[in-house]
Image (cartoon, rainbow, N blue to C red):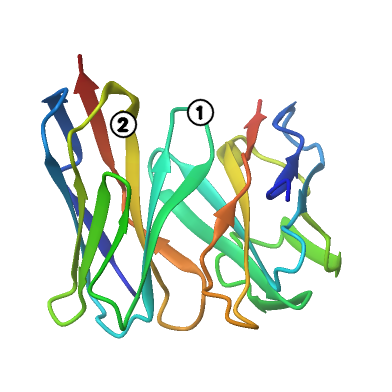
Amino acid sequence: DAGVIQSPRHEVTEMGQEVTLRCKPISGHDYLFWYRQTMMRGLELLIYFNNNVPIDDSGMPEDRFSAKMPNASFSTLKIQPSEPRDSAVYFCASSSLGQGGSNEQFFGPGTRLTVL
Amino acid sequence: KQEVTQIPAALSVPEGENLVLNCSFTDSAIYNLQWFRQDPGKGLTSLLLIQSSQREQTSGRLNASLDKSSGRSTLYIAASQPGDSATYLCAVPSNSGYALNFGKGTSLLVTP
């Protein structure tokens, strides 16, 4: 398996623009997580899905952030409009609990977002 | 809310030394704990996962222990090498589900 795939790896945009981050989880995993990492706050959960259904979005900063998982192999995180304080590294992770899964989370390489 | 603390924040050791990284958490009702490694500018690599029923897990030169009752875990690295230089993160699931709460990490530098 190729592991968790994220795109783009780097994104530089101007304030006010829409940003869409993409994630492909490991095949067969039924949990998908979006985290954000900053120097000040470390790694924090934004939202997670189970079987494509959002379970906990309490970490989503505000209405400018939205996430979808239209099918088991794809998820998006959208920021509209983007602001400089959104600059961070955004990670996607996936895991499996069913059929003896351990919920060990596997992370993608991240998307480094810079909002000017 | 589950709080995770890692001590020390940074550590520098000469090659060959054995070392211990510490992690503590506030809510002992966890069902697992995961240790990760993060290289600069890179993603997180899972090192070890300890289930709540286990006391320790080993992978090569790494050994992680878990004491749920005291809310502590340690990561032991034997015979450290310069390639071990990275940030090590400890994470436990949140009280309400499966998302992870992370410590701020220990930045390790192993000098030749």
Residue that extends furthest to the front in the rendered view of this protein:
B60
Is residue B74 depicted above or below B17 in this figure? below
Binning the other alpha carbons within 10 Å of mark 1 as few (below 14), some (14 to 19) or many (20 upward) gives few
Contact check, label 1 and label 2, Cβ < 8 Å? no
Residue shown at the point (78%, 53%) measured from the top left? A24
Q: Earlier in the sequence, mark 1 or mark 2?
A: 1
Is residue B95 depicted above or below B35 in this figure? below
Q: Quadrant of the C terminus of chain B?
A: top left
Q: Real-space Cα distance between discs 1 and 2? A: 16 Å
Is residue B95 depicted above or below A92 in this figure? below
Residue that extends furthest to the right in the rendered view of this protein:
A70
Residue shown at the point (16%, 23%) measured from the top left? B15
Q: Name the one closer to the observer, B82 or B61.
A: B61
Q: Quadrant of residue A16?
A: top right
Q: Which mark is residue B84?
A: 2
User: What chain does badge 2 belong to?
Assistant: B
Q: Quadrant of the N terminus of chain B?
A: bottom left
Q: Which residue is mark 1?
A: B41
Circle 2 SS class: helix
Binning the other alpha carbons within 10 Å of mark 2 as few (below 14), some (14 to 19) or many (20 upward) gives some
Q: Amino acid at mark 1?
A: Gly
Is residue B24 depicted above or below A11 in this figure? below
Residue B57 x/y as whole percent: 30, 64
**Horizontal side of residue A18 vs B35, given as left or right:** right
Q: Amino acid at mark 2?
A: Asp
Residue B88 x/y as whole percent: 32, 44
Residue A95 x/y as whole percent: 61, 67
Q: Quadrant of residue A5?
A: top right
